[in-house]
Image (cartoon, helix red, strand yellow):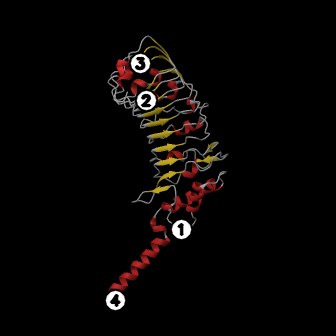
Amino acid sequence: MERLLTKLCMLIVVALALQMHGNNGCLEKERIALLAIKPFIINATVIDDERNRTVESWVDNRVFDCCDWYRVECSTTTGRVMNLLLSGLLYESTTILNFSLFQPFEQLQILDLSDNYFKGWVDSRDPDSFRSLKQLKTLNLGGNRFSGSILSYLTTRTSLTTLILYSNNLEDFNPTQGEGLGNLRNLEYLDMSTTSINVSLQELGLANLRNLKFLDLSENGMIGSLQELGICNFKNLIELDLKWNNFEGHLPPCVNNLTILRALDLSSNKLTGNIPSINLLTSIEYLSLWDNNFEGLFSFGSLANLSKP
């Protein structure tokens, strides 16, 4: 009986120790890093339930495991922060984002900073600190006000499989300061819609991204041919959205090699010539070719075998 009481007391002591140390959840340096991010949220110009829930959850108290904080997701085995989901918290912010804040999160795989209207970025600690996130797979910077220099900052982030940059102002991107996007060979999902990017298709380097499954370059006024874009290399594409650009030339026959393509939108471009037979695209579910300069007759019979015409 005495041994049982002794063991019970030991268990209580261990439980209390675990509680005091946050159940050995997130690392102390990651907890401190999260608290350094918190002022950005506190100073949000618009206060709503999402903002309040986040601020109230991120408590500067070691009793609470920061892995339980709202919008923070950790590994159940290591306790390291894996995902930071910080979208839509700032609203019309005039804040400049400091990427050095994320340097401690060495196991980070998903970073979502979308729709926060950051007007710019700096890296005050170390120019390579963001590149130290070697496990980063998904980066969502859409709905901000980053300039084209952000692309030069990301060109060596080869671990990325998803890169979302919609609704930024990338028109000043200068590939001579970096290497285009051609080195991001693991990318499967790329959204650069409505970014005003203004470089040649060769300089952008998308033709090297042969693993792409989703590509959205819509509403950019891009100039060039579909061959220059690299469409013949995108054999893994499932969705391709190029609407509202200035692509010229013929629709290449190699489009028929995109055998798993489900959605193709080429509307509002300057494509010319005859529309090639697309009867081999049996996987297509959505097709838009309107507002181009195609010639000749198009037989709707070529759509008869599509899975969802």
Q: Which residue is tagged 4?
A: 2
Residue linked to disc 1: 62
Assess disc 3: are there few (<14), some (14-19) or many (≥20) residues with their C-alpha within 10 Å of its C-alpha. Answer: some
Ranked by sequence position, the earlier of labels 3 and 1 is 1
Mark-to-mark CA distance, 2 and 3: 18 Å
First along the sequence among labels 4 and 2? 4
- What is the crowding at mark 4: few (fewer than 14 residues within 10 Å), some, or many (at least 20)? few
Q: Is residue 149 above or below residue 43?
A: above
Quadrant including the N terminus: bottom left
**Residue 298, placed above or below residue 80:** above
Mark 1 belongs to which amino acid?
Arg
Q: CA distance from mark 3 to mark 1?
A: 61 Å
- Mark positioned earlier in the residue sequence (2 or 3): 2
Return the mark for residue 289: none
In percent of width and height, residue 111 lies at 50, 48
In the depicted view, which residue is nearer to us: 301 or 13?
301
**What mark, if any, has residue 252 been given in the picture?**
3
* Residue beneath disc 2: 208
